[in-house]
Amino acid sequence: MSKKSILFDINRCMGCNSCQLACKQENDLAPHNIEDALAGNCPTWRKVIEIEQGEYGEEQINYVSLACMHCADAPCVMACPTGALFKDSEDGRVLVDQSKCIGCRMCLQVCPFGIPQYDFNDLMQKCDLCLKKLSEDENALPACVAACPSKALSYGDTNVQSQNMQKKAAAKFILATDKPYATLF
């Protein structure tokens, strides 16, 4: 089985938070009482963050939809002392076995994206690429991807998605310079 991944296109994201809400709903991550909601004590496996750039009066806002990258050489897996974090050998997902988690937070310390979340029992949890949903229907999309109205998130074979992004980047480069790529060097 080929490795599947979610690809994010910053140029398409409008910061609507649909992906974040769909993830919370699909994985039952909503706060279960008003105190937790008000305190912000509820896990969020996918977060939309706002990045502001530019000078005052000419600022530009970009949004980034961020979740576990399911890294090829995941530092969180290497740092986990109990083996609670592991790579699925079939599709490359980074998964969590909460029965092995001791809540040491080593995974959080080494994750360059700050992805690991902790539940009310202080056990690590994170995006699993909608494992249950996709195992029931191989044609389904992860909840965040299905909910994205601007198609900023796409899901598919990692190699195919990478090739498509390279083609898009090359086309953008050629349009910007008005020269074929080979003639620039």
Image: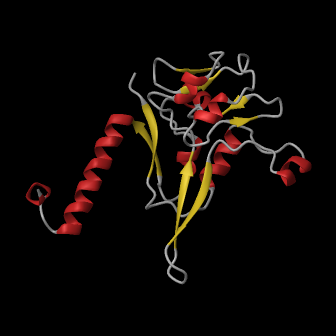
Could you say where residue 108 lies in the image, as x and y percent from the top left?
A: 64, 35
Q: Quadrant of the C terminus?
A: bottom left
> Residue drawn at (59%, 62%), measured in percent from left and top?
50
The answer to whether residue 96 is above or below residue 62 is above
Is residue 181 visible to the viewer in this orientation of the structure? Answer: yes
Furthest residue in direction bottom, as rendered: 57
Could you say where residue 170 lies in the image, as x and y percent from the top left?
A: 23, 55
Q: Nearer the viewer, residue 83 or 95?
A: 83
The answer to whether residue 146 is above or below residue 159 is below
Q: Nearer the viewer, residue 133 or 47?
A: 47
Q: Quadrant of the N terminus?
A: top left
Is residue 148 visible to the viewer in this orientation of the structure? Answer: no
Could you say where residue 103 lies in the image, as x and y percent from the top left?
A: 75, 26
Left or right of residue 173, residue 83 in this image? right
Left or right of residue 181, residue 131 in this image? right
**Can you tell which quarter of the image residue 45 is in?**
top right
Furthest residue in direction left, as rendered: 183
Left or right of residue 182, residue 130 in this image? right
